[in-house]
């Protein structure tokens, strides 16, 4: 009975989300192909309030999770973006994205879908302004001069798509959205869906009822759970819904939606190395304060009925309701894409045996890779080096194999410029 309930809950949630997730992925591909990183860097340079606000507005629609946004932010910083603008970008980007906003609307309703980017904007602007105001210049780490690392850091280089026709760019945008983006967030999306279904089936309703009477305590517990855990903005949505169905308030669920994707131990460690300890503390503090502040606003000032659409809990809990053929087709397509990208990128990371023994081959342990997007980032950075004949990057072990006459220091610098480190 529990097994049937689990699969019914999982299928109901997937059918609600899949059309919006696919739409968000395609829009993400369009942003990737048509937005030039040089324009972003130009607008984010210099001090003051303007670059901080622009960075937040740039970051909100970009579909980058917390591991994917780090190398992108490092690239922007090294291309001249201010520390405040970089911090603003780091706060806003992983909390939202066009894919997660669309999926939030599909499962949690319009109020959540509106408040999520608004909270990201507020937290990013105040956090970025605080970094500009309270961090000393000597806190800065060494910043490399502008380079071509943007193309390896989650954004295309300016000339990567410049020679393509408009139709070819559209094809590339769809390919990026439905292949690269699915590979980047697919694992965490599946984890989020499975955890949500397990909570729905296994957790007694009474467990969270008493905790919901003390909203600040509940939010504190959620912060302690969400910050160390890695979960992407889209994967957090079904978990938030399942917790609300078990009795937690919408405000507590909102804390998970905002704090989980933006702050985890890996991102904090890399950020501390890149921007300094004080900027990192302000970053984490801004994320937590904004999440709790908006959570209290939702629970104390806004009607609870806004945040619990009546049609979705029944479907999420029981798997009933009219499911359209279109939603089912989208769910099947999403499953096919998840399987395809898993096979494609798993095979991508292994070395091939046809390399001649006479060729020079060196292995490097890259620290900080967490998803296929990171794997692709490192592969592109190393493949662009002079003398590199072939490059394979294994995500599970973190081993990058470079074949050819390549200076090891050049390898370390390329990995560093991409936002990672070599042990």
Image (cartoon, rainbow, N blue to C red):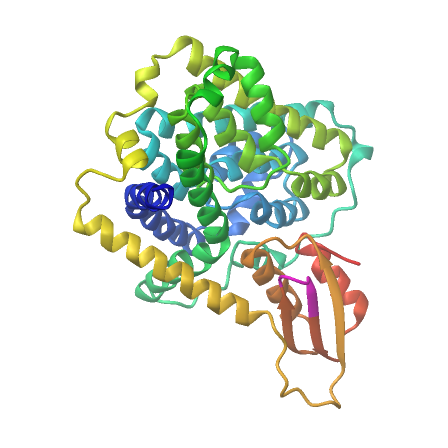
Tell me if residue 396 is in the magenta stretch. yes
Report the side of 11 relative to 179 (left or right).
left
Report the side of 126 relative to 416 (left or right).
left
* Residue in the foreground of this view, choosing between 375 and 79: 375
Q: Tell me: residue 349, above or below residue 256.
A: below
Quadrant that contains the N terminus: top left
Q: Residue at x 68, y 62 (%)?
A: 398
* Residue in the foreground of this view, choosing between 363 and 247: 247
In terms of image quadrants, where is residue 388?
bottom right
In terms of image quadrants, where is residue 276?
top right
How far across and down, in percent of the image, does residue 288 sit? 60, 24
Give the magenta part as a residue range: 395-400
Quadrant that contains the C terminus: bottom right
Residue with the most extreme top position = 301
Q: Residue at x 38, y 58 (%)?
A: 178
How far across and down, in percent of the image, does residue 183 sit? 47, 58
Q: Tell me: residue 67, above or below residue 399.
A: above
């Amino acid at each position: 009975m529990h097994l049937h309930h689990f699969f019914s809950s999982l299928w109901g949630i997937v059918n609600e989300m899949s059309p919006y997730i696919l739409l968000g992925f395609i829009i993400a591909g369009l942003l990737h192909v048509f937005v030039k990183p040089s324009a972003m860097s130009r607008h984010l340079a210099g001090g003051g309030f303007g670059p901080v606000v622009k960075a937040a507005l740039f970051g909100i629609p970009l579909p980058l999770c917390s591991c994917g946004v780090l190398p992108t932010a490092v690239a922007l910083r090294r291309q001249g973006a201010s520390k405040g603008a970089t911090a603003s970008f780091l706060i806003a980007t992983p909390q939202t994205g066009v894919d997660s906003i669309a999926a939030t609307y599909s499962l949690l309703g319009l109020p959540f879908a509106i408040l999520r980017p608004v909270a990201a904007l507020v937290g990013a602007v105040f956090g970025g302004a605080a970094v500009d105001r309270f961090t000393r210049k000597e806190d800065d780490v060494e910043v490399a001069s502008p380079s071509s690392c943007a193309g390896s850091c989650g954004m295309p280089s300016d000339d990567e798509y410049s020679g393509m026709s408009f139709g070819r760019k559209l094809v590339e945008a769809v390919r990026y959205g439905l292949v690269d983006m699915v590979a980047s967030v697919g694992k965490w999306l599946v984890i989020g869906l499975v955890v949500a279904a397990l909570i729905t089936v296994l957790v007694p309703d009474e467990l969270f009822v008493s905790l919901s009477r003390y909203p600040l305590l509940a939010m504190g517990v959620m912060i302690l759970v969400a910050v160390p855990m890695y979960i992407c903005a889209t994967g957090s949505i079904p978990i938030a819904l399942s917790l609300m169905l078990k009795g937690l308030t919408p405000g507590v669920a909102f804390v998970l939606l905002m704090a989980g994707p933006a702050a985890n131990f890996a991102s904090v460690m890399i950020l501390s190395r890149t921007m300094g300890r004080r900027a990192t503390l302000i970053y984490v503090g801004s994320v937590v304060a904004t999440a709790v502040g908006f959570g209290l606003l939702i629970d104390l000032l806004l009607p609870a009925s806004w945040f619990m659409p009546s049609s979705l809990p029944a479907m999420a809990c029981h798997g009933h309701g009219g499911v359209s053929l279109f939603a089912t087709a989208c769910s099947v397509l999403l499953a096919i894409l998840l399987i395809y990208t898993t096979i494609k990128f798993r095979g991508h990371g292994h070395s091939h045996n046809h390399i001649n023994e006479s060729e020079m081959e060196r292995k490097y342990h890259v620290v900080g890779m967490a998803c296929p997007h990171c794997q692709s980032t490192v592969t592109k950075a190393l493949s662009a080096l002079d003398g590199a004949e072939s490059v394979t990057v294994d995500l599970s072990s973190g081993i990058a194999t470079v074949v050819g006459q390549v200076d090891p220091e050049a390898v370390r610098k390329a990995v560093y410029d991409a936002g990672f480190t070599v042990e």
